Amino acid sequence: MILVTGGAGFIGANFVLEWLARKGEAVINLDKLTYAGNLASLESVKSDPRHVFVQGDIGDRDLMERLLAEHQPRAVVNFAAESHVDRSIHGPADFIETNVVGTFKLLEAVRAYWGGLTGEDRANFRFLHVSTDEVYGSLGKNDPAFSETTPYAPNSPYSASKAASDHLVRAYHHTYGLPVLTTNCSNNYGPCQFPEKLIPLVIHNAISGKPLPIYGDGSNIRDWLYVTDHCLAIMAVLEKGRVGETYNVGGNNEKTNLEVVKTLCAILDELHPDSPVVPHEKLIVFVKDRPGHDARYAIDSSKIRNELGWQPQESFETGIRKTVAWYLANQAWVDNVISGEYRNWVQTNYATRT
Ligand code: NAD
Ligand code: DAU
């Protein structure tokens, strides 16, 4: 079996479902269930004996050591993190605690476990760390896309904390020989993403007739990848990646935020003509920018494509339609997560922007 951390979050839950469907191998799913963790995303595997959910913190070394000793996983895939840039600006402490200290403690527990393995179990063990393209900083309009050799230059407390965790993972390989793999992926979108991130926030606001807040002038560029394609990339790296290497993962879908929001509005006009405000574009408002807002991300994914034969299955056009359709069909999932905590966050982040 494998141990997944953060498997009740957006990408982690998609990964667990995809893993069970494609590989059939059992998963221990360790998640703290912060505001971002949601067991409703895992409803379909609730009674599946191959999925064991444990609520806990990657920073709880005793718990992690116990879980590793009891279940003897052949791999650990680390998704657990605080992941929202705006929250890292309002309150960086949790990001340092989980992304830096938590990753360190998890590495210590894994190092002790791996140190006790022998023979093939030791040789085949892998620790895969899921990271982000944001560690590379921001690109100018005509700069080449980020490659695996682009120097790290994180700009937000979130990306700095992820960069620190990547460096720890690298050091545990270099110093202790821990068999690690790291993936640095661009912006994901798809089912089960918490509606604090741009795409699900815009879908949710649009169908509720609320303003669609675009930071600055909407010209910032992100490289979008459908979440299942990210999950398949992680599986490919886990299976065939070279130990100690990092792999960049991206969709080759550079879009300005304004383009993304207008695309969502057009799809919603078609799929949800009964919204309170149509055309949905009428809801767009330009609001105060994110401090330190990175201008452009773009990923050169030629290494994973050439070495491991991975390539995205979804285009932006097919993936974004599927995503809108999923949110329209799963209002109950959204209603379940827009609790008091969510309303407080919306107030904290947006009240002073307009
Ligand atoms: P998310 O915020 O949706 O989910 C994070 C999950 O981790 C939640 O279930 C949360 O409960 C859990 N968690 C948080 N702190 C924990 C702790 N201390 N111990 C155990 N569990 C904890 O995030 P996501 O978007 O699914 O991202 C998953 C990973 O992928 C993160 O490491 C993120 O940096 C990385 N990533 C995200 C994107 C993206 O576009 N969303 C892109 C590239 C990389
Ligand atoms: O690049 C990978 C990263 O993508 C991941 O590492 C992060 O975990 C993930 O959250 C994401 O970070 P971003 O900051 O790019 O995603 P977000 O959805 O927050 O914002 C996308 C863009 O949209 C960004 O330029 C900011 C802008 N934006 C965002 C929000 C929430 C708005 O214009 N309005 C908004 O209300």
Image (cartoon, rainbow, N blue to C red):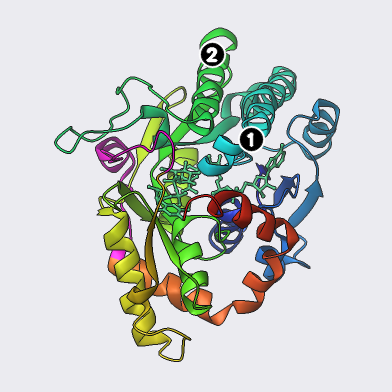
Residue 166: x percent and y percent? Answer: 51, 24
Q: Is residue 315 part of the magenta span, yes or no?
A: yes
Decide: few, some or many residues near mark 1? Use Cα within 10 Å; few <14, some 14-19, many ≥20: few
The answer to which image quadrant residue 300 occupies is top left
Q: Is residue 187 part of the magenta span, yes or no?
A: no
Residue 224: x percent and y percent? Answer: 34, 53
Q: Amino acid at mark 2?
A: Ala
The outermost residue toward the top is 175
Instruction: Let me know if residue 23 appears in the view.
Output: yes
In front here: 121 or 294? 294
Magenta range is 290-316
Q: Residue at (58%, 58%) from the top-left corner? A: 194
Q: Residue at (65%, 22%) from the top-left corner? A: 119
The residue under label 2 is 171
Q: Amino acid at mark 1?
A: Gly
The outermost residue toward the bottom is 274
Q: Residue at (72%, 64%) from the top-left corner? A: 339
The residue under label 1 is 91
In front here: 225 or 341? 341
